[in-house]
Amino acid sequence: MTEPALEPTSTRERIREAALELFGEKGYDGASMNDLAERVGLAKPSLYNYYRSKEDLLLDLVEEGMRQWDAACMAPFSRPATFERQLSDHLRLAVEFARLRPHVVALFQLATTHVQGELARRVQGLVEGLEHSIRERVHEQIERSVAAGELDAETEDVHVFLGIFFHGLLFLQTNCPHLVGPTNERLDAIWRILFRGLSGREPLPEVTS
């Protein structure tokens, strides 16, 4: 039986991947559409058939990156399980996503902290819109867990804390690996500290099927 042929990478996907690398190397302001066209192997006018401007390209990358994050990392919060198990699974998926897609994580940080003016407002509006359904799913699970006594904190405080925790963890993992080393190798210890802080007790041993 022959293996199925791999789908060819589309030109738009090649542009996205090259742009992620380029923005990671030079920053948003330092990267030009000329640089990008050369890296992809397109004439600059052909590049504009896919993106009208560098601003539109950045917005598309943010939107696509958040969709990838949602698909790769957020499924645990839709499964019937305790919040403890949901959060543990999410932590492992998030760390793995950052390991496999560091340029996407770096792009979130770049787009939300390094662009200014009207573009910054457009990025913020896009992110807020895309985050809404994600936040609702997590908030609902936190609320249930607090009401059941599983977590020893206010719902909104837990939500804010987790946002700070994950942003900080993934920032260090992708931007300062020399400070934290391979995060996946110390993930069990990180998880125990995180859950103790939220619940006041040790997490339950995980049972693998």
Image (tube, rainbow, N blue to C red):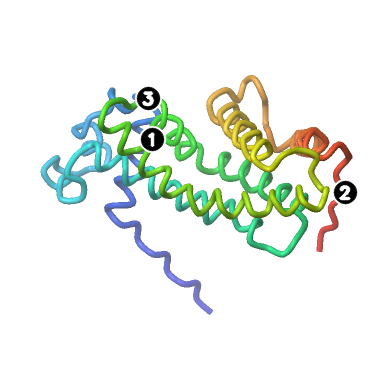
Reading the chain from its start, which is encountered first: label 3 or label 2?
3
Tell whether label 2 touches label 3 (CB within 8 Å): no
In the rendered image, the quadrant that contains the C terminus is: bottom right
x, y percent for residue 173: 60, 30
Q: Which of the labelled discs sits on residue 21, or is there none?
A: 1
x, y percent for residue 75: 61, 58
Foreground pick, 72 / 112? 112
Q: CA distance from mark 3 to mark 2?
A: 40 Å
Q: Which of the labelled discs sits on residue 114, or is there none?
A: 3
Q: Secondary structure at mark 2?
A: loop
Amino acid of disc 2: Leu
Reading the chain from its start, which is encountered first: label 3 or label 1?
1
Label 2: which residue? Answer: 204
Residue 38 left/right relative to 73:
left
For this orientation, the residue located farthest to the top is 179
Q: Nearer the viewer, mark 2 or mark 1?
A: 2
Amino acid of disc 1: Glu
Residue 143 left/right relative to 198:
left
Amino acid of disc 3: His
Q: CA distance from mark 3 to mark 1?
A: 16 Å
Asked if 20 appears above or below 69 in the picture, the reply is above
Q: CA distance from mark 2 to mark 1?
A: 40 Å
Tell whether label 1 touches label 2 (CB within 8 Å): no
Foreground pick, 180 / 18? 180
x, y percent for residue 176: 57, 22
Q: Secondary structure at mark 1?
A: helix
Which residue corresponds to the image point at 82% horizontal and 40% vertical from the top-left?
199
Which residue corresponds to the image point at 21% horizontal and 39% vertical from the top-left?
37
Foreground pick, 153 / 55? 153
